[in-house]
Image: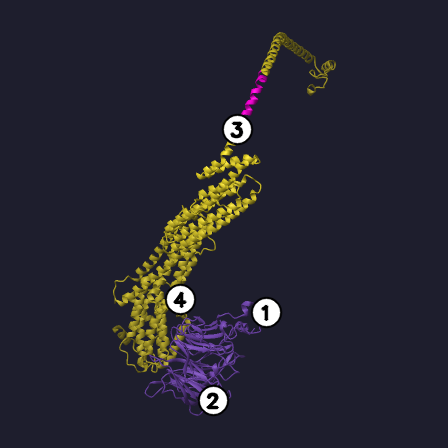
Chain colours: A yellow, B purple
Amino acid sequence: MADFDDIDNPYNINGPNFCPEMYVQKLLKGSSLKQVMDNEAEIVRDTQSLHSDMQTLVYENYNKFISATDTVKKMKSDFRVMEDEMEQLAANMEEITKSSQQISSTLQETRQQFTKLLGVHSLLKRLQFLFKLPAKLSARIKEEQYAQAVQDYIHAQRVLERYGNMASFQGIQKDCEIILGDLKQRLRDQFKNKEASAKDLAKAVDLLLQLSEPADQLCAEFLAHAETRLEEQLGILDSFQEQDLLEFVDMGSKGFLSDLCLVVASYNDMFINRHTSDVHASDDFETLATGQLSKFVMERMEKYFALVSSRVEKQQEVGETLILVRALDRFHRRLQAINTLFQHTDFTLTGTNIALKAGRRQCKIHLQALKGHFWEALTRVRQTLAAPKAAGQDKDGPSLPELLTSVVLATRVKVKNVLQDLLVFLQPDLMFAMKPMFREAFCVDGVREGLVVGFMHHLTATARGFCAPGHHSVPPALLLLLSKMCLDFESTTVRELLSHTDDCFDAGVTSSSAVTPPTELCANMKAAAQDLLNHYVRMQGLTVSQMLRKSVETRDWLHTIEPRNVRAVMKRVVEDVAAMDAQVGLLYEEGQRAERSSDSSRRTHSMSVSRQFRPNWSSYASSQLDQSAIATNIHKLFSERIEIFSSVGFSKVSILTGIIKIGLKTFIECVRLRTFSRFGLQQIQVDTHYLQLYLWRFVADENLVLFLLDEVLTSTVHRCLDPVLMEPSVMDIICERG
Amino acid sequence: MADDNSIIYGLEFQARALAPQLAETEAVRFFVGTQSLKFTQNQIHLVELDEEHSYVNTRVFPHSTGEIWSVSPSPVSADVISTCYNTITEDNSCVMKSALWRLPPAETEDQTDVDQEGGSGSHHSSMNPLECLCELDTMQHGKEVKVSVFHPTDGSRVMSVVDNHFLLFDVGESSPKLISKGTLEGKGQPRFMTGKWNSHHKCTQFVTASECSIRSWDLREDNKQAWCIDGAHSQLVRDFDINPNKQYYIASGGDDGSTKFWDVRNPSEPVISISDHSHWVWAVRYNHFHDQLVLTSSSDARLVLTSVASISSEPDGHLGAPEDEVDSKNGRLADGILATYDQHEDSVYSVEWSVADPWTFASLSYDGRLVINKVPKAVKYKILL
């Protein structure tokens, strides 16, 4: 069946190349009879339907054609009427044109005459004005209406120039020029007149310029005059240095600055902006004029800034920060005005610098005040520390911890107050405070580093100063107190103050290398605390040492009687150590002990330890002394070296251990330099036993005390001519009785 | 700390007195005096270091008159020493005396050994007793004789320091003659701690330590005080030494645990102050050849070798040394601790450099332990190269 789709196929009954012969033949050949019959019926049916379709189409088209013919016929008749009407219209128009030409030709003459008459009238009017001009000008000048006079003159000038060659007008011109000369002179006089306000001046200059006076000369004159005025203002300002700062700044702003603004503004109007109209040569002049102006303004402003700076400095010696800041702000705001007028230089920059300088200076002043306050606080503490001794054992004075908290608190409060005070510099409504340049420099350099960190360094330096060898009269309690203070600062206050500062002054945000980290300050504080504490231990150790040393050195140990008592000096040592213990205990925690046992068992325990150390002390015969030396040597091998002048920990027992160590080591060394009789040895034996009974409670490791006391006794045994020890029971009795 | 092996020699008695044998310039020898209250047991040991075999030869001389507190060698005769000793009188009280002794000549080795418990590898030989040349009459001037030191060059002059006096004796003849006497006046019975000849200025000055100050006395002008460093230490001055090569410079050590270096022309402030010890400094000694090396000994049982190159007589190291060959770090000795020696277990009361070998020194602790050490090789090369 594909064959039928092909258009060129001769078998396609719908195609143009259809060949009926071939089609029939093919059909006859390829189909059965039935098929042929069917096919025939189909073709017949198709033919019939096509035929009827064709008939319908022909009928429809015929109808349309008839209606079109009718319409054409109707149009033809209408056009004929229209043509007639148009011809009539053209004839009418021609007639109208003709009559209008007639009218205009009759009126022509009268109009020309009229125009002429009008011209004559205006000329006459102008001439009249010219003749009246000199008199008018003088009148105006007399009435001091200079502006009007100038305007009149300029008005007439062109005419005069045009008709200047006529004799009658020359007279008028001359008169005018004389009058104008007078006018110019008057105007210039105004320049020199000190009373004249800037506005008047500006007016005069304006008029002169209109009269085409040379502009650069006028500039110079104008500025020269302005200078005298402004200098005067500055002079007045200078003489008011003693005034209140706010008033001073106001006066500066109202007097000097506003005048300067006026000068600049009028100058701009008169000399710079005016010339933009005539392009040629105005560029040159403008740069010249601007140059003159900027030089002038810079000089004035410099003087002004100098004045303000010096005044602000004076203020800082006495005044309140708030007023200072208000004044600075006002001053800074007014600068804004001149800045908008005079764009070549940013005066607010200088203004901000002045504010910054003032801020820094304020920081410094506060730092000084803080230092002074701290020193006063220390002096007070020293006095209170000294007072109770003078007044006997009065318990009325504040205790060490109270003094400490008062110093720390006062310092903290002072610093915070100062910060609060300085915060005024950062109030959001202040113009200069908003400048990042000011903010950064003031917050980081001024407040954080300069003031807070500087003060911390001062604290440590002052505290350390007390450890210097030059200070002999420092009360030990002060050292202790300072040490604890540094420790307090290290643990909380430094961080607190710094974070407070960072919060208030957002100085921590710019975490550049220029910012001292709190850890560094803390480390400093800790080191200072350690130094102070070590110094305290050395001092107190020395006190104990001196007592022990004197007690050993001044006695004749060879000719001493049998011991009946503990020597008083030992009791004194124990008392003093107890006092130190109490003193340290007020500020420092107890600390770790090597081993602890209940107090009740303590005494027997310590005795047993002591016996372990030196078995059968009492039964030493002199022949056994070497053996004992070997025993101690062996003991030394196994025990750690004892550092005498070593650093101590921040706890009571550690501090006391340090002091006792120093004292006992001195005892050893002193004993070794003496020679003892039997009773001398026994006295030392009693003394050491007494110390042993009372000193253990103060130290971290009682074995240390035992070891040192043991060493004292061993050394004494070695230095004894007749080393026979006392019975322990007798020793106990003597000690208990003491 | 010590990179060279140190040699330890043990005495069976406690001891404080140590001195180099000054007139001996070949062998490294030290005198040691013992301190025993059984007075007859006391001895003088002459210890000689045998470097090849790393042991010490010892000659022991009985010093039966008393316990020895100090020993001083004669500068000219190797066999003459002076001692200050404590002895007992009939009425059972102690007195301090000072005497000059001559060592018996060295004999052949076949002397019998005395049994010693001390250091291993040490040889002891018992000798003939010391010959007492003379006793110095100090009794009438005071109780406590601190030292009797020979004039640095003249073997016939001995200065004794007694209580608050210093007494110059002529011992050239058979019996010593008191030539001159100086006294420190002051309230509260001042006492000298020690004294030393100043080898500068033709030995016309004698320097003493008392309490917290150091004083120099001009022997030509009737023992007038020449200069004084008041408050040199905040507590007792235990010892000092005079820079042998650079006049005006001295070192001091005291009970405040610090060692200080002074220019005596400016007595108000030390040039350098260091606190390397954790207890009193008992002895301080300049090296005679390289005075940037300073030894200090302390009752913390330590010995510290310190460099003070910045104020030594050879401040820029050895002159003419090719600087660029050694890098700048090693080129010059910096100030500070060079070595700490922990070999002692008791207080070290004295330390001395050897006269014969500039790199060897000996230290003596109270328990009778003598330790001979050498300067670390690295330090030595830094100084020499």
Q: Secondary structure at mark 4?
A: loop
Question: Can residue A125 be seen from the camera position used here?
Answer: yes
Query: According to the image, label 1 marks what residue?
Result: B325
Comparing marks 1 and 4, which lies closer to the viewer?
1
Image point (38%, 63%), residue name: A462
Disc 4 residue type (three-letter): Ser
Query: How many numbered discs sit on the rendered protein?
Result: 4
Q: Which residue is mark 3?
A: A122
Residue B158 falls within the magenta-colored stretch: no
Badge 1 and badge 3 both on one subunit: no
Q: Which mark is residue A647?
A: 4
Residue A117 included in the magenta stretch of the image: yes
Amino acid type, callout 3: Ser
Residue A148 place in picture, x, y as percent: 47, 37
Q: Which residues are magenta?
A: A103-123
Q: Are marks 1 and 4 in contact (CB under 8 Å)?
A: no
* Main SS of residues in magenta: helix
Q: What residue appears at the point 49 percent right and 86 percent down from the top-left corner?
A: B76
